[in-house]
Image: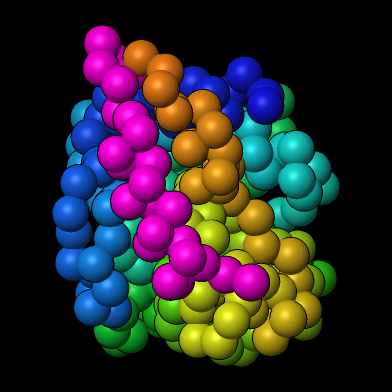
Amino acid sequence: MEAYKQEFIEFMVESQVLKFGEFTLKSGRKSPFFMNAGAYVTGTQLRRLGEYYAKAIHDNYGLDFDVLFGPAYKGIPLSVATTMAISELYGVDIRYCSNRKEVKDHGDTGILLGSKIKDGDRVVIIEDVTTSGKSIEETFPIIRAQGDVEIKGLMVSLNRMERGKGTKSALEEIQETYGFPANAIVTMAEVIEYLYNRPCQGNIIIDDTMKAAIDAYYAEYGAK
């Protein structure tokens, strides 16, 4: 596993973004782990988060693209932080773009924030986590409506590796439905491999009991 992935796993735990216990998800599933990207709140956290995303985007898609699109609302700071990190780490200027939930009819009008998207642009979409793919259903037509663009892929922070609407993971479903690749900085398999019976922030985060709970969850909800 790449060093930045190991650092990112520890960063999620340290920032209390990734927690283990008993949680009821929006889907109604009872999960032994929960991720809340809204817990990244400081300048230092956002700077580091942008760097991890930048490295993952570089590894998966390269930097030969024009626009990083972050769907409202959580995607807005992600796109800003990551374009800054790409500039600082690799010396490449990528434009950021996000959507508004409501179309603005005065001043900076329209549905987009940041850069406009135009014919010929190559776009990477950035999100925190995707469980059902619902946000892409909303995002995809917005991007397509801007012109003849190529969507090079989607990058999320964590692949939960559980079923979406069918038997496959949400990321796999997105790839099949929309025809562009979908990747994550880390997968839950990598998180489990790294944290199982290994001290992190002075504690064993995934002990035998937690590992059994995670295994039971995936036996019921894991993607095929």
The colouring scheme, among rainbow, by chain, secondary structure or one colour, is: rainbow
Q: Is residue 60 above or below residue 73?
A: above
Q: Is residue 16 visible?
A: yes
Give me the residue at 45% from left, 78% from top: 132
**Horizontally, is 89 left or right of 202 in the view?**
right
In the image, residue 38 above or below residue 149? above
Residue 76, position as x, y percentages in the image: 38, 56
Residue 107 quadrant: bottom left
Residue ID at (33%, 58%): 74
Q: Is residue 60 left or right of residue 111?
A: right
Q: Is residue 210 left or right of residue 183?
A: left
- Between 79 and 6, the one nearer to me in the picture: 6
Q: Quadrant of residue 30?
A: bottom left
Q: Position of residue 211 (x, y in %)?
A: 38, 41
Q: Which one is in front, 49 or 219? A: 219
Residue 220 lies in the magenta stretch: yes
Quarter containing the N terminus: top right
Q: Can you say whether 1 is above or below 93 in the image?
A: above
Verify whether residue 21 appears in magenta. no
Examine the rendered structure and indicate whether residue 71 appears above or below residue 104. above
Quarter holding residue 91: top right
Q: Does the rendering let one see residue 162? A: no
x then y, percent, for residue 140: 58, 82
Q: Nearer the viewer, residue 65 or 117?
A: 65
Q: Position of residue 96 (x, y in %)?
A: 53, 53
**What is the count of numbered marks?**
0
Residue 52 falls left or right of residue 92 = left
Residue range highlighted in magenta: 200-224
Q: Quadrant of the C terminus?
A: bottom right
Give the residue at x 34% y 74%: 100
